[in-house]
Structure formats: C-alpha cells, structure tokens
Image: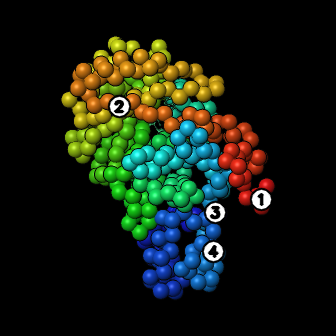
Amino acid sequence: MKPYFYDLGPDAWAQWVRAQGLPAYRAGQIHRWTGRGVSDWTQLSDQPAAVRALLAADFDIDGLTAVGRFVSEQDQTVKTVFRLRDGNLIETVLMRYRHGDTVCISSQAGCRMGCAFCASTGAGFGRSLTAGEMLAQAALTGAAEGVRVSRIVVMGIGEPFDNYDNLIRFLHLANDPDGMGIGMRHLTVSTCGCVPEMLKFTNEELQVNLSVSLHAPDDETRIRLMPIARKYLIDELMAACRTYTEKTGRRITFEYSLFSGINDSPGHAKRLCGLLKGLLCHVNLIPANEFDGGLFTKSSRATVRLFQDILESCRIPVTVRRELGTDIMAACGQLRRGLESERDNADVRWRDGQGPDPDQQ
Ligand code: SAH
C-alpha cells in the first residue's frame, strides 16, 4: 500500500519535493492541502498536472471514503462513517456548538478496553489509526460540511493512549499552522485512564486538554464498568492526575457517565467530592447513552440534578453534557457496531437524500 497523503508532515514533504527535483516552495503548497480536506489529486489546483502525476504515483489520497452520512434533525450533528483502505470502518462526528464547530474523531477502528457500557467494544478491534487517518477525519469533515473546524476532540472510537505515538504525531499535524492550524488549546484527548501514557503525556508539555473517563469514585464500582480499573486502581490513577495538573498547571476534565443504579447515588457523589477535593479539575456529567443490546440505562433527571448539586456544594466545577445527535446514534461506536457485520456491503443507508456517488453504487 502506498503512503497516505495525510500522513506526511512538513519535513517529509520537503524531503519528497527535494527527491523529485522540484522547487522547494512546492512542499509548503502541497502540505497546505492536507488541512483543506482534499480527496482527489485534481483538487490540488495550484499544482501542475506533472506534479499531481508524481504525487499520484507515490501516495494514496483517498484513504478515507465516506460510506454513510447521518444528519440529526434535532441539532445538526452530522455523523460520517468512513471506510479505510483495508475495509475497516470508523466514525467521525461534527458537533455544531455556539463557540465553534467541533469534530470528534476516532483513534482506532474498534477498541481493546472493553468498557461494559460502551458500544465501541462490541464490534471488535480492527487496528490503530495512523496520524494522517486521524487528521483526515477532521479535514474531510470540514470540507464536506463547509465549516471551519475550530476544535478537535479525540473522543470517538478507540483509546487514544493505546495508540500513543500516532496520537502525538496527529496532535502536531493538526496544530501545524500550514495544515489545519488548530491551536493546541483547541485539541482534546480523552482517556479511560492508561496511567503510564498519562505520565508520558504530562512530559510532552503540550497545551492540549486532557479528559479522563472516571465514571466511579471507588475501585469496586469502577471495576464493574471498566476493565482498566483493575489494572490501575483509583489511587494510582489519581496520583497520575495530580502529577499532570501540578507539572502542567492544566485542569483535567473528568468524565462521569451516569448509569442508573450503578454509579449515580448521593453516596457516589459524596465520595467523588472527597476524591477530587483540591484538584485542579472540572467534572462533566454525561447522561448514559442507551443503545440496543446495551446493559445500562440512564439516570433520571432528578438523580442527575442531585448528583450535580452535591458536587456543587463541595465547590467542584461541574457541568452536565448536552446530548447531541441521539436520533442518529451519534455516540461512541453505535453506528459501527451495527455496520461492521455488513461492512463489505456498500449498501450503507444514506439519510440525507443525497446518496452515495453513483459511480460507487
Ligand atoms: N477511550 C476514550 C475515548 C472514547 S469514549 C475514553 O475512554 O475516554 C468518550 C467518552 O464517552 C468516555 O468518557 C466514555 O467512557 C464515554 N462513553 C462511552 N460509551 C458511553 C455510553 N454508552 N454512555 C455514556 N458514556 C459513554
């Protein structure tokens, strides 16, 4: 397989351009297209046909093919299902917030973490994504939807810290001023709590936001929900969080999904207060996403409210995440789960009436 166009950074383009005997300025011109979401060589309008032919001989530009697009009628959330060159399917979600358009990307095709509540786990593990495949999700989504992507969150399918080196490469590519140029502060990585990588990440000294999926204040409850909790007990996880906040001076966002009768009692909320007291952090309460075959149900509004009130009374900054795109199963791996069984079948439903390219039908 040829290298993927989006996997090359500025240095690699400079090298390639030199090896081809092309003028040096071509490198910057070509690299800039990786931020613009092109998927066809003819779109590189500032490159002569001869250069495009050289590029086409050495690289693939169509590594991600949109095979499904679902638009929420509630809130304009758009979920795209992309097929990778080897047939793996991933999902990318565009969320339209007042403060800007955010793309949620997948870091792996599938996930090895096995969280009991998560739809990504059910469909099995394909492989980790390359940095370019992560970047392209955001760039292609921006181009296809005609929006300027202002933030990228690595919160889709997969565990980013289980794909550490490619993740770091991706963050640099996304940040490159000649590429997508997304400020480090507008990039967010979410982990289920892989402690060694959290510590490594601390030392990268990046201004990137870190979210930690906590979901429980005690080992017993957390182990019921997340296998990783057995490997790294809460004490160890919290020690890594403290190291992170102390060394970087950056706030951690703790994600806490509320599952009815599992982790949502006032007792859990109080224990969470004890755990987080004095830590530079923010808690994001997430109403559980229910899906067919899922084991958990969401907590009632009153339960969520009480949980929030208890945290607030302990002066812990807390917000309840607005649910977006529930009508298109926008959350975590829910579509891939349904589609993985039929992935070689081009007949993915198109709900926006545009339909796939007739050539591909
Ligand atoms: N692997 C990373 C990022 C992917 S999931 C992580 O674990 O953080 C993004 C967030 O959604 C995580 O907090 C995850 O625990 C949560 N999540 C996954 N499935 C969910 C569900 N069915 N209901 C509520 N939250 C869910």
The residue carrying mark 3 is: 62
> Mark 3 near mark 2, Cβ–Cβ under 8 Å?
no
Depicted 125 relative to depicted 41: above or below: above
The residue carrying mark 4 is: 42
Residue 130 visible (yes or no): no
Give whichever of 61, 287 is nearer the camera: 287
Amino acid of disc 4: Thr
Mark 1 Cα shell of 10 Å, populated few (<14), some (14-19), many (≥20): few
Mark 2 Cα shell of 10 Å, populated few (<14), some (14-19), many (≥20): some
Mark 3 Cα shell of 10 Å, populated few (<14), some (14-19), many (≥20): some
Q: Earlier in the sequence, mark 3 or mark 1?
A: 3
Pointer 4 residue Cβ closer than 8 Å to ligand 1: no
The image position of residue 15, as x and y in percent, is: 47, 76
Which mark's residue is nearer the viewer, 3 or 1?
A: 1
Amino acid of disc 2: Thr
The residue carrying mark 1 is: 358
Give whichever of 229, 140 is nearer the camera: 140
Amino acid of disc 3: Asp
